[in-house]
Image (cartoon, rainbow, N blue to C red):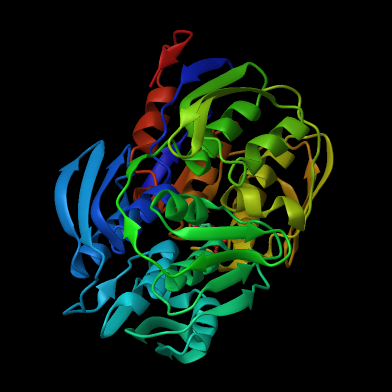
Amino acid sequence: MTMDLIALDNAIDVTIPVPGDKSLTHRGILFSLLARGDMEISGWLDAGDTRSSLNVVQALGVQLIEEHPDRLVLRGTGHPEEPLVPLDCGNSGTTMRLTSGLALAVPGLVVLTGDSSLAERPMARVIQPLRKLGVSILARSQSRAPLAIQGGNHSGGQFALSVASAQVKSALLLAGITANEPVTVREPALSRDHTERLLTAMGARLKTDSKTGVTVEPGGLHGLTLKVPGDPSAAGFWGALAALAPHRSVNIPSMLFNSTRTGFFRVMERMGVGLTWILKGESPEPWGSVRVFGQTLSPVTLTEEDVPAMVDEVPLLALLATQAPGTSVIRGARELRVKESDRIWVTATILRAMGATVDVHEDGWTIYGPTRLHGASVDARGDHRMAMLAAVAATIAEGHTILEGGQSVAISYPQFFSQYRALCQPPRPEGRSL
Ligand code: S3P
């Protein structure tokens, strides 16, 4: 689908509610598979990726008791069943990687497939450690999906990950719940810790040690009432939109405040962007409202340690850097090469087409700002986050931006373009809410 996008006046002041957090919604749905009892998830994200997780758990025996736009109730038995058919994980790396850990609880064969993007993504990072637990896993060449996993009986073990990946960590911790011994995972930097928090809230015995990492003991889980706050990765697009120009202000009324997820907002503060945070509660995760005010931007230097807390939002920093006077160096983000698209390359291609001066590195970019962006024909390459990045860039570009692949936002943020269009429609009274 092709979209024609135009620049937005600088002075805006809006409240934009964002959908529920994708990582938490996935986990709420997927963990119901090991829980005995009901899992009640309010504020869930209803989008392509989380639907993939919902279909997967149902095929493994979870009952969908209630489904409303704002609330899901799932009932697990704690004993997943062997599925009759291969499980389609769609475009979702989180569904495939977390389910590969959960599948070890299934007494039988679980086959995981996905779309052509997912079939190109690296799976050796989960296959290799899971095999060390004594599990048989077959995969296509170069350890790509489909995966065929023979579950039913596995041991524990200790793992030191070379990459900070919440998906890999989670697959191993979930395997630990149904192993016959504990599983310990150490990562080079702390990735998002939702799995640890939710498993603990569901009755798992978890221990975190700064030297050895996180250890989970085998044991049963019970259901949970989970309120899912707004997704910081979705809010990041509106935060960047506000930060791109002075006199823009965006208020996000509900956003997850877990510090393993708010890195982008904290780095924006480092760049001189105005932020107000109001903590409102625990769900069991901390959440609150955040307001972002555009002010003069300073260039940014980003290193490997900054990346885990903002991995999906790193491309937005590249966009902000095009408006900061000076040289910004964003490195340590090699993982972006193996997301839904090669995001280092796609980001650079979009920004260059719009007039930015960008050097590309294996693990990031050097960006020379400021540059006045102009409209161009750009392609999101089927990647939802690249489509939203281009749309945000278009709000400060001179002339029309023609975006190919905007429909991919259905993966994580189906209402993105209706909110975006409403924002662009005149007249714009101060302080309105979308
Ligand atoms: C996610 C972890 C991250 C992130 C992805 C969601 C999760 O991936 O990019 O969008 O929910 O665990 P990695 O674990 O590969 O870094």
Query: Where, by quadrant of the figure, is residue 229 drawn?
Result: top left
Front-most of 213 and 116? 213
State the residue at coordinates (74%, 37%). Answer: 371
Front-most of 31 and 322? 31
State the residue at coordinates (53%, 69%). Answer: 168
> Is 314 situated left or right of 138 in this image?
right
Can residue 399 be seen here? yes
Residue 39 lies, in percent from the top left, at 27, 49
Query: Relative to residue 373, is residue 381 depicted above or below?
Result: below
Query: Where, by quadrant of the figure, is residue 263 drawn?
Result: top right
> Is 71 situated left or right of 414 in this image?
left
State the residue at coordinates (71%, 65%). Answer: 188
Front-most of 342 and 173? 173
Residue 184 lies, in percent from the top left, at 58, 71
Query: Where, by quadrant of the figure, is residue 101 drawn?
Result: bottom left
Quarter that holds the C terminus = top left
State the residue at coordinates (47%, 69%). Answer: 171
Residue 319 lies, in percent from the top left, at 66, 42
Can residue 397 be seen here? no
Instruction: Give the mark count.
Output: 0
Residue 165 lies, in percent from the top left, at 58, 64
Query: Relative to residue 196, is residue 143 depicted above or below?
Result: below
> Is 304 situated left or right of 101 in this image?
right
Query: Relative to residue 433, is residue 125 depicted above or below?
Result: below
> Is 98 situated left or right of 339 in this image?
left
